[in-house]
Amino acid sequence: LVGEYLFEELIRIPTETEYASEFRYRNPVIDDGTVVIAVSQSGETADTLAALGEAKNRGALTLGVVNAVGSTIARETDAGVYLHVGPEIGVASTKAFTGQVAVLALIACYLGRRKHLSPSISTQFVTALHDIPRQIAAILEHAEDAKAIAERYANPEAHQENWLYLGRGYNYPVALEGALKLKEISYIHAEGLPAAEIKHGPIALIQEGMPVVVIAPAGSQYDKIMNNIQQVRGRGGSVIAIATEGDREIARMADHVFYIPDTLEPLQPLLTAIPLQLIAYHAALLR
């Protein structure tokens, strides 16, 4: 999903994200000039391999974004990029997620530059991407903040077995990632949603003290996400915010704030995902 947003914004190419498990059971529209990108940490995912075969049979150019060198998807695709992030020890991908987003961002920037992006915008984008490792290291220095959040809401005595994750724009996919990690490794029920959609049903589920993680860094939709925070507070939910360093306004609105460095909006997922993975990690240890 992050890749879809990047491709449509930077390259202006219509892009669709598909579940590999559903792709071959539909009748997908693949025209001349369609490119299908298979994203897989292991390069051996059965559903993704089957979807890849379907795409090739229909004449698509196939690319792989995989981590495992020499894996089946790497061999079956026409071309691709290796993540080179080292082996994932657990099923729940952390560094592979970061690597996948970084690779998709680079592809989007490269193709955007070949189409219409100016040299100055391209340089700004690559410079910001180059700064991401330092910024992630700065986030990891504050891992204790994530631990404190987990201890408050994820310890068994808290009886908080349902979490919501809310994001807008590039950070909606991050809300999905945060909820997925909490489910995968701590076995707490969690759901990721586009923040505006809480009023279409899910807001009825918010109860007093329920943890609601809101990804709210500085950006084009900041004012709107602040409005969503007010809606959550109105229902008695406990707001855990991921915000940009220096944001004092959100500290008055949220019960807990985890601060991240500032970066370009399309690159925010590389930073906002890290504290959510840390919260899930510490929640799993507590459980």
Image (cartoon, rainbow, N blue to C red):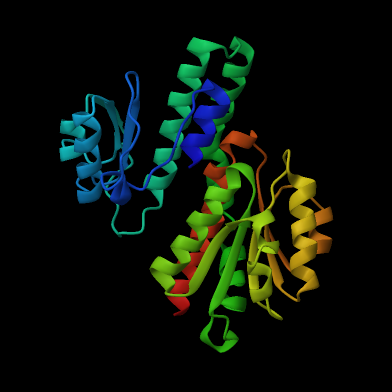
Between 216 and 195, the residue placed more toward the observer is: 195
Taking the image as drawn, is residue 130 in sight?
A: no
Image quadrant where residue 211 sits? bottom right
> Which residue is found at the position 75% from the left and 76% from the top?
236
> Which residue is found at the position 23% from the left and 24% from the top?
59
Between 75 and 19, the residue placed more toward the observer is: 19
> Which residue is found at the position 48% from the left and 11% from the top?
114
Q: For this view, does 174 lie left or right of residue 251?
A: left
Taking the image as drawn, is residue 243 in sight?
A: yes
Give the x, y percent position of residue 245.
72, 47
Q: For this view, does 241 lie left or right of residue 76?
A: right
Give the x, y percent position of residue 67.
28, 40
- Above-or-below relation of 31 to 164: above
Between 51 and 110, the residue placed more toward the observer is: 51
The single residue placed furthest to the front in the displayed view is 27
Image quadrant where residue 41 sits? top left
**Quadrant including the C terminus:** bottom left
Q: For this view, does 1 lie left or right of residue 79?
A: right
- Above-or-below relation of 206 to 90: below
- Above-or-below relation of 107 to 22: above
